[in-house]
Image (tube, coloured by chain):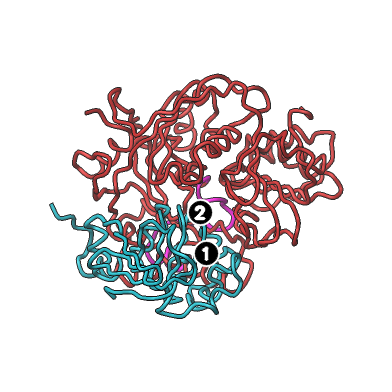
């Protein structure tokens, strides 16, 4: 019987034939946590009797979720992280560096075919680089920090083939929102999703990260793509010294739980309505709804390509006087490149508030908590009630184009009207 | 802790971890008592005062615990001395986190359970008895590694005792 990508990677890391449904203990190539999960991981590490981390170059912490700190309690947990990483001698990416997932794809601790665990649910992002990257909780992460190993139930795999060609003004965010709407919030629970097809082939790496990032919103354990020239180019650019990539492909006779095929040539821009990510409609159904805040950023859509799209749309235009437009580049690198290209200048001139790299207002800790009754249109991956810090606000999710166009018009707008 | 007994508090489908414990609280403390005060407050602000410690179950529909990987969610539930979470299905990371922190999670059909019903769960027999409705249900069984972790009282104890992961052949 042939094998899926997840079966192959879990097999090569556990030293045994891995088949969906089996439990394996696998060696991880890298493990990291962020400031929402690392403090509890440190606590578990100590209670477990941990002395050293399994490998200093295969472990990292990132401070991104509440960065810079918003209050004394947060500051003391950040200090705990800094002290722990210094004591154990592994890197901590501090408040200057940006969102863990962008930091990871820019530092590339793992190559194609690798296995990575992160204490953050959107760790699935690097599946776009053909890594099996899996989100875990703090205590699982602590066990990985100590032993370099973790147990996994080998997932069933869902193959999703995306055919056709996206029309201009429709982006990978629209694709993944549409899929989540089709499959539902539990539609891929504990599964791995293999993506392929002409639409995936034509997407940039940045756009592919957006898709793998959001598989978590269907409950998927991982989302994974094949390696092509764009993947190799990304790897050469961001980690030329990395070991030779060893791409993993599924066998032709691999056993899939299901194979879903879509032609998305006529897909419209999509919007997820409150308070569920799978509550997805075409933008035309919500166009005209007044917004109070627009947010461009996050591990889903805070990359250079996303900022460029917004800047191009805002050139010669201004943010609507009754809208607060918050822009948060995903990383220091993204900030620097966007500055060099003049993208940041264009955004600020048009009336955007550009913040330091990090998660920004996505998790409701700081930097843009909405008022009661307000409507936010965001490029993030979650619109749960209370997600941005106020259960009485409503969050809609869309692509960078939809968000930028809506920031100009003051209401939800199909970005294609302004392009 | 083999027999758990208490009253059901009923919730719907897709209760996410932001609802269980909001991000605005979880970043500033490791004091779970503090977090437990805010358990599920965006759904029911009085929830943490209503429940009787050691005598309450959270009962929900499908996909309980979806969303973020925050282990503060099961820890805040455990700190509130909820006997167990009973749901039709659970999200992956939340489910693992519950096992790891030693919070019993029970997968079974919850349609017949109403708010206020008196439940008794026997983890040993693998049954959930609804005393109010006078019905008994089988609960789903767990893989051996999860049974081992739970029987040690959580992953910390499992790991400390065994020094790592050991799968029975």
Q: Quadrant of the N terminus of chain B?
A: bottom left
Residue A331 visible, this angle: no
Does A86 lie within the magenta span?
A: yes
Q: Residue furthest front?
A: B134
Image position, residue A336 (x, y; %): 64, 43
On the same chain, marks 1 and 2? The answer is yes
Q: Nearer the viewer, residue A51 or A286?
A: A286
Q: Which residues are magenta?
A: A82-102
Give the chain of mark 1.
B
Q: Which type of secondary structure does the marked residue at label 2 adopt?
A: loop
Image position, residue A187 (x, y; %): 45, 42
Does B24 lie within the magenta span?
A: no
With respect to residue A362, does B3 lie above or below?
below
With respect to residue A262, does B17 lie above or below?
below
Q: Is residue A98 left or right of residue B97?
A: right
Q: Nearer the viewer, mark 1 or mark 2?
A: 2
Q: Quadrant of residue A319?
A: top right
Residue A412 visible, this angle: yes
Q: Residues within 10 Å of mark 1 (few under 14, many from 20)?
A: many
Give the chain coloured cyan: B
Q: Which type of secondary structure does the marked residue at label 1 adopt?
A: helix
The label on residue B20 is: 1
Give the chain of mark 2.
B
Chain A painted colour: red
Q: Is residue B100 left or right of residue A271?
A: left
Q: Nearer the viewer, residue B22 or A282?
A: A282
Q: Residues within 10 Å of mark 2 (few under 14, many from 20)?
A: many
Residue designated by label 2: B14
With respect to residue A188, does B146 lie above or below?
below
Q: Is residue A190 left or right of residue A358?
A: left
């Amino acid at each position: 019987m042939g094998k899926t990508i997840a079966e192959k990677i879990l097999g090569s890391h556990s030293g045994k034939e891995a088949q969906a449904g089996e439990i394996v203990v696998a060696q991880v190539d890298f493990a990291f946590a962020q400031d929402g999960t690392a403090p509890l991981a440190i606590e578990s590490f100590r209670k477990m009797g941990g002395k050293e981390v399994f490998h200093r170059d295969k472990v990292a912490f990132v401070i991104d979720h509440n960065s810079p700190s918003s209050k004394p309690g947060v500051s003391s947990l950040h200090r705990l992280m800094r002290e722990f990483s210094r004591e154990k001698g592994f890197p901590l990416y501090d408040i200057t560096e940006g969102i863990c997932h962008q930091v990871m794809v820019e530092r590339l601790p793992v190559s194609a075919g690798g296995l990575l665990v992160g204490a953050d649910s959107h760790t699935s992002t690097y599946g776009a680089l053909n890594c099996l990257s899996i989100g875990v909780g703090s205590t699982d992460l602590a066990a990985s920090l100590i032993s370099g190993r973790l147990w996994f139930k080998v997932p069933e795999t869902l193959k999703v083939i995306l055919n056709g060609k996206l029309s201009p003004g429709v982006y990978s965010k629209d694709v993944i929102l549409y899929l989540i709407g089709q499959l539902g919030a539990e539609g891929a629970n504990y599964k791995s999703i293999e993506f392929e097809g002409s639409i995936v082939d034509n997407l940039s790496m940045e756009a592919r990260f957006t898709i793998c990032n959001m598989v978590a919103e269907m409950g998927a354990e991982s989302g994974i793509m094949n390696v092509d020239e764009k993947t190799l180019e990304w790897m050469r650019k961001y980690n030329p010294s990395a070991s030779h990539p060893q791409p993993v492909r599924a066998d032709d006779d691999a056993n899939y739980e299901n194979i879903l095929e879509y032609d998305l040539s006529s897909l419209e821009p999509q919007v997820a309505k409150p308070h569920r990510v799978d509550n997805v409609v075409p933008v035309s159904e919500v166009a005209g709804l007044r917004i109070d805040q627009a947010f461009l950023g996050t591990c889903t859509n805070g990359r250079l390509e996303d900022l460029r799209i917004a800047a191009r749309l805002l050139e010669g235009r201004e943010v609507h006087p009754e809208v607060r437009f918050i822009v948060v580049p995903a990383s220091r690198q993204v900030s620097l490149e966007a500055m060099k290209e003049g993208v940041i200048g264009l955004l600020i001139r048009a009336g955007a508030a550009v913040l330091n790299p990090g998660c920004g207002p996505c998790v409701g800790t700081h930097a843009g908590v909405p008022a009661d009754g307000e409507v936010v249109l965001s490029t993030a991956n979650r619109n749960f009630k209370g997600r941005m810090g106020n259960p009485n606000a409503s969050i809609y999710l869309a692509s960078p184009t939809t968000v930028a166009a809506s920031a100009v018009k003051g209401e939800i707008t199909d970005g294609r009207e302004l392009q | 802790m083999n027999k758990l007994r208490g009253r059901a508090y009923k919730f719907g489908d897709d209760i996410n971890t932001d609802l269980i414990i909001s991000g605005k609280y979880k970043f500033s403390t490791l004091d779970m008592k503090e977090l437990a005060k805010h358990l599920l407050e965006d759904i029911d602000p009085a929830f943490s005062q209503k429940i009787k410690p050691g005598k309450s179950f959270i009962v929900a529909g499908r996909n309980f615990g979806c969303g973020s990987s925050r282990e503060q969610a099961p820890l805040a539930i455990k700190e509130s001395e909820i006997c167990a979470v009973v749901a039709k299905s659970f999200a992956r990371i939340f489910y693992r986190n519950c096992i790891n922190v030693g919070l019993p999670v029970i997968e079974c059909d919850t349609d017949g359970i109403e708010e206020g019903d008196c439940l008794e769960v026997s983890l040993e027999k693998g049954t959930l008895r609804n005393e109010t409705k006078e019905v008994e249900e089988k609960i789903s069984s767990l893989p051996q590694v999860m049974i081992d972790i739970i029987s040690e009282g959580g992953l910390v104890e499992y790991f400390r005792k065994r020094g790592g992961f050991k799968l029975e052949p």
